[in-house]
Image (cartoon, rainbow, N blue to C red):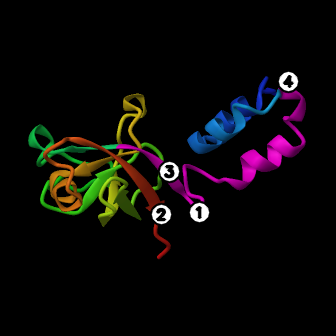
Amino acid sequence: MALRPATAAGFALLLGCITCVATASSVGAAELYGPALSRVAHAGNGASASTYSRVGEASWYGGRHIGRLTASGERFDARKMTAAHPSLPLDTRVRVTNLRTGRSVEVLVNDRSARSTGRVIDLSAHAAAALGIKHQGIARVRVERIES
């Protein structure tokens, strides 16, 4: 007996694609094997679409994380221009723009952040300082994937 997910979001979960779950969650079950299937299947695993651009809150982390292993397997160094993101592939380069000041930085995604925080990205202390958000702690930003 084959498993049939009840929704397009269920199908996305079977594929293991978190980005697709969000995309497919508004699609009805009746569309599951039609347009929903193509919408779910083409996005790939994670948030890997080349046109990735999100606006939301960014925060920074350091302190107790220094020296711990990141999701990419390297030790966290708050002095590097790195970031944690909930779904972009590791080793993805992104441009983070502070929407209040217009200042931008480029960082490497080398860690995972919790989806439950509602933030679009967590920056290393050095990246946050370069972006001008370290003192305030949280800022509204745009995150854009940089094609390599």
Determine which quarter of the picture holds residue 95. bottom left
Numbered disc 2: secondary structure: strand
Circle 1 packing at 10 Å, graded few (<14), some (14-19), many (20+), is few
Q: Which numbered mark, 4 or 1, is in the foreground of this view?
A: 1
Q: Earlier in the sequence, mark 2 or mark 1?
A: 1
Residue at the location (67% across, 53% down)? 43
Label for residue 1? 4
- The spot of residue 110 in percent (x, y) is 32, 56
Determine which quarter of the picture holds residue 119. top left
Which residue is under mark 1? 51
Residue at the location (21% across, 50% down)? 133
Which residue is under mark 3? 54
Q: Which residues are magenta?
A: 29-57
| Amino acid type of the residue that numbered disc 3 sits on in the rendered structure | Arg
Numbered disc 4: secondary structure: loop
Numbered disc 3: secondary structure: strand
Q: Is residue 94 above or below residue 112?
A: below
Left or right relative to 106: residue 90: right
Which residue is under mark 2? 145
- The spot of residue 78 in percent (x, y) is 14, 54
Does the CB distance between marks 2 and 1 fall below 8 Å? yes
Q: CA distance from mark 1 to mark 3?
A: 10 Å
Q: Residue furthest bottom?
A: 148
Q: Which numbered mark, 3 or 4, is in the foreground of this view?
A: 3
